[in-house]
Amino acid sequence: MKIPVAKALFNSHSYSEYRKLITDLLLEKKSTGEEQSEDLTHYSELNETRMHRLDKTIQISEDIIQKLKSLKSEYIWLVISEGWCGDAAQLLPIINKMALESGKIDLRIVLRDENEELMKLFLTNKNKAIPILIIVDKETGSVLGKWGPRPKGAADLIIDYKKEFGVIDETAKTNLQLWYLHDKGLSTQEEIINLMQNL
């Protein structure tokens, strides 16, 4: 196992611990991460509401559940996240439900700003984009693959918007949230299960 991965796992949170951490920080008007601002706290509050809703409503398709249950090995899914990240709020409830349905996946979450070494191993176009899902073989501790920070449809939407307008503004962020709403987590489920089956 890579040392940064081992270190991160040692300091990782379960899904419920991660949710509680964000809730507790919000009571102090704070967000996760090194940087603190009204904006980041505001995003964390929105994400808290979003995750509450998705925890209740997100459905894993029967087809995906069967595929998850038929995985041959046991895995750790290590996710790099932060409470203010809009994509993480959309994706973590799906990733959590998939892990629970499988019976073979232990989901652990770490904060990006507390795990610089780990983040540097999983950059996207030289950026610290999150969330990143790292797939670890539970038995050997070896990293088998990664997924993130967004499903392809969401990533393409942002790339196209930036090409056209040169910036990622509030309109782009709204469009992205609408994309997630209409997709209902299906793209994420499909992409992750395909990755798992191809390991």
Image (tube, rainbow, N blue to C red):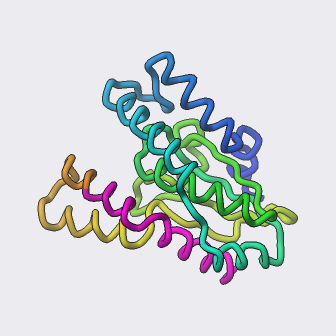
Q: Is residue 148 above or below residue 64?
A: above
- Residue 86 location in percent, x, y? 40, 47
- Residue 141 location in percent, x, y? 80, 61
Majority secondary structure of magenta residues: helix
Query: Would you say 88 lies left or right of 70 here?
Result: left
Q: Residue at x 55, y 31 (%)?
A: 22
In this view, the residue farthest toward the bottom is 198
Quadrant of the image occupied by residue 184: bottom left
Q: Residue at x 49, y 16 (%)?
A: 28
In this view, the residue farthest toward the top is 28
Q: Residue at x 57, y 63 (%)?
A: 59
Residue numbers of the magenta segment:
175-199
Q: Is residue 29 above or below residue 6?
A: above
- Residue 20 location in percent, x, y? 62, 31
- Residue 199 location in percent, x, y? 69, 79
Can I make out residue 142 in this image? no
